[in-house]
Image: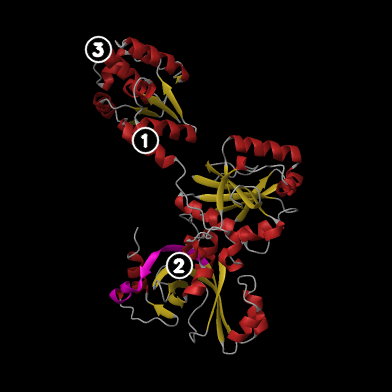
């Protein structure tokens, strides 16, 4: 994007004899991060040469050489000026008209000016939407930049250049992609100050898991021209080290990507995989709604739409949650339940909203169990309800200390059993419960609910329950109406 700066913006930006307006610093920083270009019109050099402050003129003229000028700017003919209703009573008017004419002809995308006369002239010919005041362009650039993102507990966000790519952790990637090619790509990505999500120690010496990501705009992602429209997140590399496999870290990294996508309003996520080397990764991403869309060289390309298409065939509640995780159906056809859960189990099952996460060791992944890392979780209880079924919504109510609802899940399966072998086969990939502890629970018929964690939200305190017609205490699974659910959700701060 080419952004043309009016002289009244250019002079304070480049006059080193005065303190720099923080908004101009923010503009410069944001433009550099986004890869936009600040440009000037050649005629503005005449404007600058008329400055009566000789010292400032010399400084600014020397510094504007760093800007690209509009090449072969369009000529403004008298008939163009008359048709637009632009007056030209001075040299300043002439320069203003040339800047607006360049914008109108498409030589630049945006003109930045605090001159009210320029804004009035732009309005006369319908291009006022492309003329920004300083405050407006700063806000626009800030809106285009990556949003501040708090990574989930146990995951760190680091720059690629913080890691030694020669360490053994990267050996399998060198084998897969070729040592020279991978090292060159990594060095190039590091030079662009690319980031990753990882599990690593404080000083980035011991790297155990890594997800390198990149935000793109409407990329073509396959050899046959499949394009993803809008803001797109590419997961360039996703690797979990041997030492922590089985702890569901891959799910944790995907969960991080989904959270990032929500914060930054990402429309699609995609990943390149190789069937020969990435069987586990393919299985993982397919389980969260990624679908094969084509080939890129020797790799298969899997993509996931974060939101349903306008013309998408209606999906069942569970399929919708899988395809568009972390979005879910909550319409009137979906049953809703409040599930009470004691604080000690809530801490382990939902680590990102745990009390422990705020402690000194809250970001140490060694303290998190596999069920802490999973998106697919299990809940076991002795409730006698037979109403819970696939696709239902579960609102988890933390009893005891906080007495609030802070998490929502979608049911994959609900089954009642006293068979320890069946129970373990269902929950072993989602929990660290031993067969002994499960067997004790199964002395009575036990309801096993397999569910997907969809989202956390600011807590809904129990004080709101009575207001919407839900009577306390909630000591077992309680079905609520769609209207009660809607009222509860409306109390969540936006």
**How far across and down, in percent of the image, does residue 118 sit?**
27, 24
- The stretch in magenta equals 453-467
- Residue 378 placement: quadrant: bottom right
Q: Residues within 10 Å of mark 3 (few under 14, many from 20)?
A: few
Q: Residue furthest front?
A: 360
* Mark 2 vs mark 3, CA separation in Å: 65 Å
Magenta-drawn stretch contains 204: no
> Label 3: which residue?
90
Which residue is rendered at x = 52% and y = 57% of the image? 152
* First reached walking from the N terminus: tag 3 or tag 1: 3
Q: Quadrant of the N terminus?
A: top left
> Label 1: which residue?
138
Up the image or down, 399 lies above or below 169; here it is below
**How far across and down, in percent of the image, does residue 346 sit?**
49, 71
Which disc number belongs to residue 407?
A: 2
* First reached walking from the N terminus: tag 1 or tag 2: 1
Q: Quadrant of the C terminus?
A: bottom left
Is residue 486 toward the left or the right of residue 177 in the image? left
């Amino acid at each position: 994007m080419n952004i043309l700066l009016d002289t009244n913006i250019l002079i304070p930006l480049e006059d080193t004899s005065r303190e720099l307006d923080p908004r101009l610093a923010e503009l410069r920083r944001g433009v550099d991060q986004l890869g936009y270009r600040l440009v000037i019109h050649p005629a503005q050099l005449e404007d600058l040469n008329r400055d009566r402050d000789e010292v400032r003129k010399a400084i600014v003229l020397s510094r504007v050489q760093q800007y690209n000028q509009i090449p072969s700017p369009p000529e403004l003919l008298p008939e163009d000026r008359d048709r637009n209703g632009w007056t030209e009573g001075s040299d300043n008017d002439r320069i203003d008209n040339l800047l607006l004419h360049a914008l109108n002809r498409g030589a630049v995308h945006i003109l930045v000016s605090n001159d009210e006369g320029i804004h009035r002239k732009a309005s006369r010919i319908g291009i006022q939407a492309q003329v920004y005041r300083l405050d407006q362009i700063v806000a626009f650039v800030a809106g285009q930049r990556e949003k501040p993102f708090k990574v989930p507990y146990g995951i760190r966000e680091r720059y690629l250049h913080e890691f030694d790519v020669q360490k053994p952790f990267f050996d399998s990637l060198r084998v897969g992609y070729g040592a020279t090619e991978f090292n060159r790509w990594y060095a190039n990505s590091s030079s662009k100050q690319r980031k990753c999500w990882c599990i690593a120690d404080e000083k980035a010496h011991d790297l155990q898991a890594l997800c390198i990501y990149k935000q793109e705009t409407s990329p073509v992602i396959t050899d046959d021209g499949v394009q993803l429209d809008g803001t797109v997140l590419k997961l360039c590399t996703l690797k979990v080290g041997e030492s922590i496999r089985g702890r569901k870290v891959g799910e944790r990294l995907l969960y991080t990507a989904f959270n990032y996508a929500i914060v930054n309003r990402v429309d699609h996520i995609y990943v390149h995989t190789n069937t020969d080397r990435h069987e586990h990764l393919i299985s993982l991403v397919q389980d969260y709604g990624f679908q094969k869309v084509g080939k890129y060289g020797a790799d298969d390309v899997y993509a996931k739409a974060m939101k349903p298409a306008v013309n998408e065939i209606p999906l069942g509640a569970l399929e919708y949650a899988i395809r568009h995780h972390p979005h879910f159906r909550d319409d009137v056809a979906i049953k809703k339940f409040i599930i009470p859960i004691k604080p000690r189990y809530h801490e382990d099952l939902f680590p990102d909203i745990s009390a422990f996460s705020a402690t000194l060791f809250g970001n140490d992944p060694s303290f998190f169990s596999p069920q802490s890392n999973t998106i697919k979780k299990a809940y076991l209880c002795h409730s006698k309800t037979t109403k819970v079924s696939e696709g239902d919504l579960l609102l988890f109510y933390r009893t005891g200390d906080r007495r609030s609802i802070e998490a929502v899940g979608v049911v994959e399966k609900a089954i009642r059993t006293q068979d320890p072998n069946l129970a373990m086969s269902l929950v072993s990939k989602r929990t660290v419960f031993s067969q002994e502890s499960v067997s004790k629970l199964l002395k009575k018929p036990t309801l096993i609910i397999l569910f997907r964690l969809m989202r956390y939200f600011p807590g809904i305190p129990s004080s709101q329950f009575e207001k919407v017609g839900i009577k306390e205490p909630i000591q077992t699974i309680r079905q609520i109406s769609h209207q009660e659910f809607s009222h509860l959700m409306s109390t969540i701060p936006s």
